Image (cartoon, helix red, strand yellow):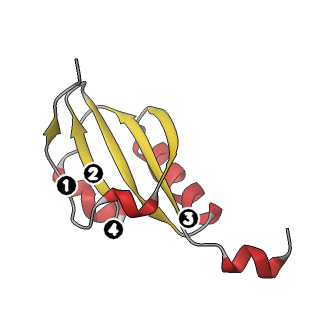
């Protein structure tokens, strides 16, 4: 892929799921991403990520916190909402 094609790509969306519930105080550490405390005891961190360098930066933050990373999922960046979301979402049955 050419450098021009790389620069013209829109940001991708990602959802990182970590073990445990992160407190609201961590929301500013993850910039403009949405933190959702899931009903199964995990936290989803989701939103638009500009490039692979930013994604790796997020992964390093999770590593530096000593939190267990459960999954990384590609999502539609438009489907992440606009506001910070701290709450508990019930586990689907």
Q: CA distance from mark 3 to mark 1?
A: 21 Å
Decide: few, some or many residues near mark 1? Use Cα within 10 Å; few <14, some 14-19, many ≥20: some
Relative image position of residue 46 (x, y in whole percent): 38, 53
Q: Quick one: quadrant of the N terminus?
A: bottom right
Q: Which quadrant would residue 3 be assigned to in this image?
A: bottom right
Q: Residue at x 61, y 66 (%)?
A: 51
Q: Would residue 69 appear left or right of 55 to someone viewing this image?
A: left
Q: Residue at x 36, y 57 (%)?
A: 79
The residue identified by callout 4 is 32
Relative image position of residue 6 (x, y in whole percent): 74, 73
Q: Would residue 41 appear left or right of 9 to someone viewing this image?
A: left
Q: CA distance from mark 2 to mark 3?
A: 17 Å
Instruction: Please say if the residues under marks 2 and 1 sit with CB atoms less than 8 Å apart.
Output: yes
The residue identified by callout 1 is 85
Relative image position of residue 77 (x, y in whole percent): 44, 61
Quick one: 57 or 5, which is closer to the camera? 5
Helix, strand or loop at disc 2? strand
């Amino acid at each position: 892929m050419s450098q021009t094609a790389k620069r013209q790509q829109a940001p991708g969306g990602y959802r990182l799921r970590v073990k445990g519930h992160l407190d609201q105080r961590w929301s500013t550490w993850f910039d403009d991403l949405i933190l959702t405390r899931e009903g199964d005891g995990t936290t989803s961190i989701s939103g638009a990520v500009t490039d692979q360098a930013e994604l790796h930066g997020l992964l390093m933050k999770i590593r530096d916190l000593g939190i267990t990373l459960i999954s990384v999922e590609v999502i539609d960046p438009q489907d992440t909402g606009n506001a910070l979301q701290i709450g508990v979402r019930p586990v689907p049955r």
